[in-house]
Amino acid sequence: MRRPRLVPGFTAMIDGDSLWLVAGEDVRYRLRLADPSWLADMLARCDGSRTIDELATHADARQTIERLYEERVLVDGAASQAHVAAAPGYRVTGTGPVADALRGSAGDVEVLVQTSLDHAALLAHNKRALAARRRWMW
């Protein structure tokens, strides 16, 4: 599903019946429309987070979006723009100042923290986590 974003550097400006697409000091495109305000509003919302279906509220929007893709004025947004990252979830086990600093958040991944290396405690923890089928990291 395409989520268009305006290429960085482009600015959309309305002047009468025209929408001007300017990149830096260069006028790249002039689009003449009866009412260019819908296109300026749509381009302002082309930030990579909305689908074409969400953007295409005007009758000419889809055709205009496709043409602006062809002209490389619009490109696909990044995955990070399309999705909200989930909050990390973890459970801290262990002792020491690092473990104390990380404590206070419950979640799906258990984090074993050791101030000093203790192989016996690590192996015991691994055995318990495997038996309980818990995800964990060291």
Image (spheres, rainbow, N blue to C red):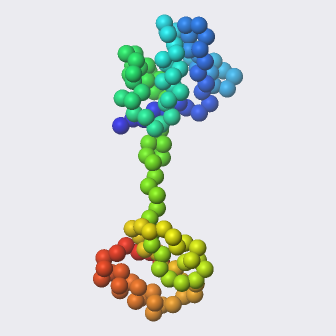
Which residue is at 46% across, 90% downward?
A: 121
Residue 120 appears in view: yes
* Image x and y of residue 15, in percent: 61, 10
Which residue is at 47% across, 36% downward?
A: 48
* Image x and y of residue 119, in percent: 48, 90
> In the picture, residue 120 is in which quadrant?
bottom left
* Image x and y of residue 81, in percent: 48, 42
* Image x and y of residue 134, in percent: 34, 75
Instruction: Single out the residue that lies furthest toward the front.
Output: 104
The answer to whether 25 is drawn above or below residue 14 in the figure is: below
The answer to whether 117 is drawn above or below residue 134 in the figure is: below
> In the picture, residue 30 is in which quadrant?
top right
Marks counted in the figure total 0
Which residue is at 39% across, 84% downward?
A: 126
Query: Is residue 103 or residue 74 the one in the foreground?
Result: 103
Q: Is residue 25 left or right of residue 46?
A: right
Quarter of the picture holding the N terminus? top left
Query: Is residue 46 or residue 28 the one in the foreground?
Result: 46
Instruction: Single out the residue that lies furthest toward the bottom.
Output: 120
Query: Is residue 44 or residue 20 the one in the foreground?
Result: 44
The answer to whether 127 is drawn above or below residue 48 in the figure is: below
Q: Is residue 127 left or right of residue 22?
A: left
